[in-house]
Image (cartoon, rainbow, N blue to C red):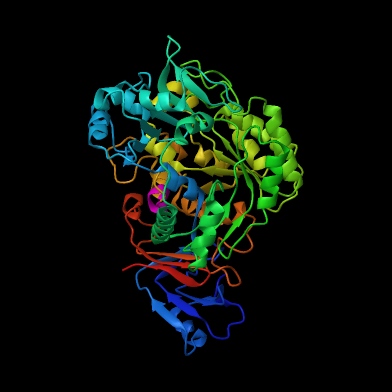
Amino acid sequence: MTAPEEATVTTADLILMADRIHTLAENGPWTPTALAVTGGTISALGDRSDARRWRGRDTEVIDLGDATITPGLVDGHAHPVMGIGLTRGVDLSSVRTLEGLKGTMKAAARNGGWVEGWGLDPNVFAGAPITHAPLVEALGPDVPVFLLLFDAHSALVSPRALELAGISGPRRFASGASVACGPDGMPTGHLLEIDALDLVRELLPDDDPADRRERLRDLMRRMAASGLTAANAMDFEGDSLELFRALEDEGDLPLRWRCAPFVMPGAGADGLDAVIAQQRLAGRRWRVEGAKFMIDGTVDGGTAWLEEPDSHGESTACFWPDPADYAVAVGKLAAHGIPIVTHAIGDAGIRFVLDTYAELPRTSAVPNRVEHLETMPSELVARLAALDVTASMQPTHCTHWTRADQSDNWSSRLGPDRAGRAFRARDLRDAGARLALGSDWPIAPFDPRGIVAAARLRRPAGDAGVEPVLPEQALTARMALEGYTVAAAEAAGLGAVAGRLVPGRRADLTVFGMDPLRCDPDEFAEAPVRLTVVDGRIAYRGN
């Protein structure tokens, strides 16, 4: 595109003008400054002077001045409904020491007698075993406590919580879950993976349904205010259907959602048939499309699937007791045209997933995906591109919880070689892989501005004194923006419909007060969002 381009424009519903419009198409030297929307679709691009031809009596015209319009941002990985349940109680994400944890516990409010919290960093224990000792010191042995660790794959619970759940020793699970026990065989309070967590979590007081609706509504509004126009929900469990329908009965959702229900080990034929049936569910701005698997857990919890044990002798097993059962389940769903999403963190897990994908028939226009991809050798990097598998990564997983000197729990468990091939975002892009970026909210904040900045800096935005983690893996500004736009659309099979600002494509737009391709990344993390537009309608209007 080297000159103004437009579809057949009668009268535009909305005209936006700004000093810069980054279409992410091949514009040549020309940068548009005006854009028209008709019926939810981009109908014209041009200069401010062209806007007069598009305007009708009822056209809304907004000149944003010194601002930048980009394709609408899409979060590649989030947990909206699960997340409002995971973020109960006190936020522990800023706790850095055991003394800080004990102080927070003493001051925490109680819900039905329980103390709850979330976001606890295992680095608080400074490499020592994670046990309920600090909870007992702070509250005594008789208060039930449930604290979710930052990865949401593990929890720390008190002796009273263990007693109420009837946990007095090791347990066997259909998945790779476990109850950590000391040398005496007694539980330490550290629960690993979902099935173990649920033994205690099912005892917690229920949320009020009206409160859950309000929390989900507020989450979506805040996401739209951060510039997001869409997101991928990596679950569709519990009351998800009721919540999405209830909110959409009240009006359009502030952003679009693609939802992939979980498939857990032991799901069986009935469970797979239920996931197949769920693919028919949809609303105006949400739909179920895909199935979410986990092949392993987390490095921090010792439940990733590595080709060699970690420094604790852990992370050696698949989340599915028999990996062949995962391959069978994936094959059945893929045969029904369902795109597959798999959480795979360790090198053995990633390898097994790619081996499985290589045998699948391509029955969907939506590529299969691998989520997280935390440590892997170079041959796996190249293989993602060769198999046309989407690499979905969360830059702040690297910048928030690992350290350049490898003194953090994640790095020390892996050792220098495996920690040195971590979060290989740039290598994936350079190898030609499709790289979608996201947050994994509530594991990390959802604000895309901070995530884009972290992808470029390889450290937390705003912390210039922090040494970058593997800075050679930094993305360029355009690569990072494409991870939220072009790659996100292609990952959803929507490359011809969304992701670029071209006449005939969806009018999903984000408007920033700064230029994401030219401004300093630390500054961009604080950039004002001037406007968020979904389907040609304003979902958020900033100052």
Which quadrant would the N terminus be assigned to in this image? bottom right
Which quadrant would the C terminus be assigned to in this image? bottom left
* Residue most extreme to the top: 184
Asked if residue 312 lies left or right of residue 174, the reply is left
Counting the numbered discs, the total is 0
Name which quarter of the figure residue 531 lies in. bottom left
Most foreground residue, 15 or 220 = 220
For residue 306, say whether it is visible: yes
What percent of the width, then of the height, locates residue 122? 37, 28
Say which residue appears at 48% left-offset and 49% top-offset: 81
Asked if residue 321 lies left or right of residue 72, the reply is right
The boundaries of the magenta stretch are 447-452
Most foreground residue, 44 or 316 = 316
Say which residue appears at 23% left-offset and 32% top-offset: 106
Residue 145 higher or lower than 519, as above or below: above
For residue 79, say whether it is visible: no
- Residue 350: say if magenta: no
What percent of the width, then of the height, locates residue 190? 42, 24
What percent of the width, then of the height, locates residue 327? 71, 33
Asked if residue 243 lies left or right of residue 452, the reply is right
Magenta-highlighted stretch: main secondary structure? helix
